[in-house]
Amino acid sequence: MESMLTTNQAARRLGVKPATVYAYVSRGLLTSTKVNRQSMFDVAEVETLAHRTGARGAVAAVTDRIRTRISLLENDRLYYRGRSVPELSGTKRFEDVAHWLWTEIDSAGLQFPEGQEIWMALPESATLTDRIRVAVALASAGDPLRFDLDRSITTAKAMIADVVESLPLVAPPKGTDIADRLWARLSPLPPAPDVLNAALILLADHDLAVSTMAARVAASARAHPYAVVSAGLGAMEGQKHGTATTIAHRFLAQAESDPMGAVAEHLRAGQPVPGFGHRVYVNRDPRADHLLALLRSHGDLVADKIIAAQPQSFPNVDLALAQLGLMFKMPPDAGEAIFAIARIVGWIAHAVEEYTEPGLRFRALGVYTGDRP
């Protein structure tokens, strides 16, 4: 019977034992229907009870097993292994923060290797993120030691360098740091690598974001680091995740000449203004606050005019990344590329952590709601 759950399925969804499901029936909280002499329960009724009791059921059985020492989101603040992320972004290099996230060991002056130039034939419609995904796949194919998980950190350093090298040059690099190399591929203007370095650090990890969950699930199957990153990139491509900054960039570009008109047009169409609010943060996104403050030292921001017109909400890092790209004449999808390259660090940190856990521990059980045989 369609949209009916067995006793065991209902118990998993409610996070209780089967005996408790029958207790709910006796108390009138659930209705049991006999189908082929088996007790069945209406999905909608079980869901209603789950919401009333705050049950997380089968989802909790998977996600509650993830213990991490990497990122902490608490009281609208973000920490990497106990250290304030805005403070790290103002005092450390991206490479050294990456090493801290991977090993919990301080370093200074760490250099990533020179990247290999990866030739790829892509259509002109290909985005920067498309190039990154292809670069990861090609780098993987060229690494015969990719299945050696003990080399994950060495692999990650080379992968990030290769990914940056895969993006077309706009101007000659002015330094050897990742921020210098990446700037030369995103902006034709004189470098401001301190801003880009800060952005990379601010975006390196964010607890169990959806792309990080995808990366950890891949790591639980003992996928090699390239495959872990590919899983993360696949989830990041979603409209609700990594591509949000490109939408915010296009909005800011339209708003340059008439900020109030751009906001009014979105509100009139019943659309949310891009780059505001967050699922985790309540009153402020500390990453956006810090990056916008850095950008203000380089000139006036279109974003500030939009922020003034949105007092009921707060800017998120997508808006800050969009403003970074707009201010320094980067392509509309530059924010996505910065996000992806930065987050490789976090995905690898979570993979290294996950490799120490029992394999395949995230095998969830589906709650079947189709026709019964």
Image (cartoon, grey):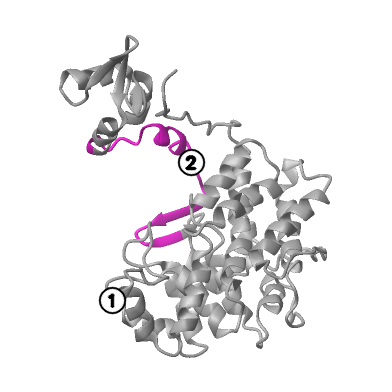
* Mark 1 lies on residue: 311
Q: Please name whichever residue, 159 or 309, is drawn nearer the observer in this view of the structure.
A: 309
Q: Residue furthest left?
A: 27
Q: Is residue 216 left or right of residue 248?
A: right
Residue drawn at x 83%, y 51% as measured from the top left: 142
- Quadrant including the N terminus: top left
Q: Is residue 60 magenta?
A: yes
- Taking the image as shown, residue 353 lies to the left or right of residue 209, namely right
The residue sitting at 31% across, 30% down in the picture is 43
Residue at 29 percent of width and 23 percent of height: 41
The reply to whether residue 11 is in sight is: no
How many badges with numbers are in the image? 2
Q: Is residue 328 magenta?
A: no
Q: Secondary structure at mark 1?
A: loop
* The label number, if any, that marks residue 147 in the structure image: none
Query: Residue 188 versus residue 179: which sits nearer the camera?
Result: 188
Mark 2, secondary structure of its residue: loop
Residue numbers of the magenta segment: 52-78
Residue type at numbered disc 2: Arg
> Could one spot residue 164 in this view of the protein?
yes
User: How far from the left and from the top, in percent, is residue 72?
Assistant: 45, 54
Circles 1 and 2 in contact, beta carbons < 8 Å = no
| Above-or-below relation of 335 to 211 | below
Residue 14 percent across, percent down from the top left: 32, 29
Q: Earlier in the sequence, mark 1 or mark 2?
A: 2
Q: Residues within 10 Å of mark 2 (few under 14, many from 20)?
A: few
From the viewer's perspective, is residue 346 above or below residue 62? below
User: Residue 179: horizontal and vertical position, in percent?
Assistant: 66, 73
Real-space CA distance between mark 1 and mark 2, rounded to the nearest whole angstrom: 36 Å
